[in-house]
Image: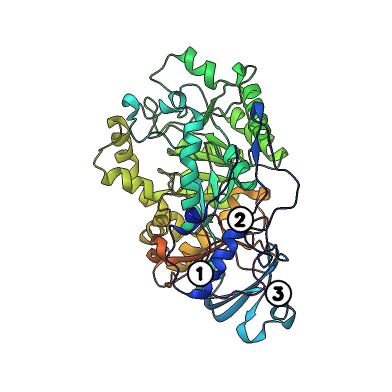
């Protein structure tokens, strides 16, 4: 099957205002049309022939030398960690930030070389969602009273197809990195990295690990059916293990489950160390997994350089997970002072996911199972008290939404400010603190610093004055991920071409 992108597909979402921008976009589009075609053969194999392409119209439209330098001038540069700086400039070379300083001091080695130049009102690091789920069930499926039924009844290919739109929207909203803590992120990340679809950097846990009768179990189905599909001891030939949850019991199964997720491509490990809200029959107040099981999971993950995220609501689960050495605690609804002290002592990252609590309560129970709404009401009030304590006492906090890619994830910053953060603190939690959630698997990102990967966004209104401006997708005017521009004037919906270079100089 010949894969191509038509001129109309690249132009239909954009209102191009200037003649120069139009010409740039037309030339970029022609180069995209010239890409050597990709064919699909029998048995699912693909290949891209290696032969010179025929000029689209004339000899003037030819592959150009690839531009590797980008100069961005900003009215206000927001570094992610630190005070904003006025009238600054940032230079990207290849995929890294090469220079930052006053606009008047940009080295000539960058401005004299072929480069692209941009001027933006506000420049800041790309945003992180540290608690996402790369699962997209059918909006027409109510789950028959069990929110988890879709895990088994929905085909993974359908979920993956829905995720393509969400991944593209995440980039459009300025989210250049996401941590998937139960979903298809391992598989989706590979498709993003190969360039087939557009999306953020994805750091996935693969399946979350649950005990039998835990938060990841499907109580409305017979145990044999669930264990056959989700149990670690039932891996069968041809079974990829791509479900969002895996049931494990005992230290041997816990160890094997970690290894299976790493084999799948997991960049972190997720454990369900207490009951939850959306699972039907367990209690959020109760701890899950024995101390020995928790310790085994953390030790095996740490040995292989993976951070561990722990879903926890009740105090027993919080204390057990933090004592076992997890990297992050998620939700943390019933944390008291003893919990806060231990989290601070261990340096554990706190990820509250406040927004989803507010959304469930504000729904009045509409659209979710009754049991989930009742459990959410029990958790919500205590959750806010604990979150405020964590902020007041200076715990390291990152932000996560507990939603899928494409949602208006920047609403989580507003929730953080309502809980007591300043606007600048919320920005730090959504940028500089994001990489802390995946430990050594994260590149240098989340801050505007020399040597860091160039995950950068340009914003039309000032988020330091009001983080709510980040919720409006039109306020995210420019998005660079790894030095490549994916959103901006004259940029098509798929970003810059990977195959051909761009004009030697182009300003916006």
What type of secondary structure mainly makes up the magenta span? loop
Residue at 67 percent of width and 37 percent of height: 301
Residue 117 on image: x %, y %: 60, 75
Query: Distance of mark 1 from mark 2, alpha carbons?
Result: 15 Å
Q: Is residue 447 above or below residue 133?
A: below
Residue 476 on image: x %, y %: 46, 64
Mark seen at residue 129: none
Closer to the eye: label 3 or 2: 2
449 drawn magenta: no
Segment colored magenta: 500-508
Counting residues from the N terminus, which is met first, the one under dot 3 or under dot 1? 1
Mark seen at residue 114: 3
Which image quadrant is residue 141 in? top left
Residue 236 on image: x %, y %: 62, 16
Counting residues from the N terminus, which is met first, the one under dot 3 or under dot 2? 2
Query: Distance of mark 3 from mark 1, alpha carbons?
Result: 20 Å
507 drawn magenta: yes
Contact between marks 3 and 1 (CB within 8 A): the answer is: no
State left or right for residue 340 relative to residue 257: left
Counting residues from the N terminus, which is met first, the one under dot 1 or under dot 2? 1
| Residue carrying label 2 | 32
Q: Residue furthest bottom?
A: 104
| Residue carrying label 1 | 22
Residue at 29 percent of width and 36 percent of height: 373
């Amino acid at each position: 099957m010949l894969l191509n992108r038509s001129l109309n597909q690249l132009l239909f979402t954009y209102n191009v205002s200037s003649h120069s921008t139009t010409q740039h976009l037309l030339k970029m589009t022609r180069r995209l049309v010239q890409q050597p075609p990709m064919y699909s053969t029998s048995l699912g194999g693909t290949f891209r022939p290696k032969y010179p392409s025929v000029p689209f119209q004339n000899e003037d439209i030819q592959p150009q030398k690839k531009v590797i330098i980008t100069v961005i001038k900003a009215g206000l540069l927001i570094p992610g960690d630190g005070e904003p700086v006025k009238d600054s400039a940032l230079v990207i070379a290849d995929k890294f930030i090469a220079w930052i300083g006053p606009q008047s001091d940009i080295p000539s080695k960058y401005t004299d070389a072929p480069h692209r130049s941009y001027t933006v009102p506000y420049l800041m690091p790309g945003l992180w969602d540290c608690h996402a789920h790369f699962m997209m069930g059918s909006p027409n499926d109510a789950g028959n009273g069990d929110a988890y039924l879709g895990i088994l009844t929905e085909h993974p290919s359908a979920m993956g197809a829905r995720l393509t739109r969400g991944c593209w929207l995440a980039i459009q909203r300025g989210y250049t990195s996401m941590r998937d803590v139960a979903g298809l992120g391992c598989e989706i990340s590979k498709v993003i990295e190969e360039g087939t679809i557009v999306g953020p950097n994805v750091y996935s846990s693969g399946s979350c690990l649950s005990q039998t009768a835990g938060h990841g179990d499907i109580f409305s189905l017979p145990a044999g059916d669930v264990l056959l599909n989700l149990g670690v001891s039932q891996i069968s030939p041809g079974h990829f293990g791509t479900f969002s949850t895996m049931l494990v019991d005992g230290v041997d199964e816990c160890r094997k489950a970690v290894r299976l997720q790493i084999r799948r491509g997991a960049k972190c490990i997720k454990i369900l160390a207490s009951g939850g809200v959306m699972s039907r029959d367990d209690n959020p107040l109760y701890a899950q997994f024995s101390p020995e099981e928790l310790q085994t999971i953390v030790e095996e993950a740490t040995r292989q350089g993976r951070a561990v995220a722990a879903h926890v609501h009740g105090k027993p689960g919080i204390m057990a997970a933090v004592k076992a050495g997890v990297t992050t605690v998620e939700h943390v609804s019933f944390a008291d002072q003893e919990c806060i002290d231990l989290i601070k002592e261990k340096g554990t990252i706190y990820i509250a996911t406040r927004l989803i609590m507010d959304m469930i309560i504000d729904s009045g129970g509409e659209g979710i199972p009754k049991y989930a709404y009742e459990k959410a009401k029990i958790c919500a009030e205590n959750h806010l008290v604990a979150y405020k304590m964590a902020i007041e006492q200076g715990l390291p906090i990152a932000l996560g939404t507990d939603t899928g890619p494409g949602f208006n994830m920047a609403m989580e910053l507003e929730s953080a400010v309502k809980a007591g953060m300043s606007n600048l603190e919320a920005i730090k939690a959504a940028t500089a603190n994001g990489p802390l959630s995946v430990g050594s698997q994260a590149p240098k990102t989340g801050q505007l610093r020399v040597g860091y990967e160039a995950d950068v966004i340009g914003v039309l209104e000032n988020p330091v004055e009001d983080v709510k401006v980040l919720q409006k997708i039109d306020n995210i005017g420019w998005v660079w991920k790894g030095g490549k521009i994916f959103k901006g004037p004259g940029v098509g919906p798929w970003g810059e071409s990977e195959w051909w270079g761009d004009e030697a100089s182009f300003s916006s």
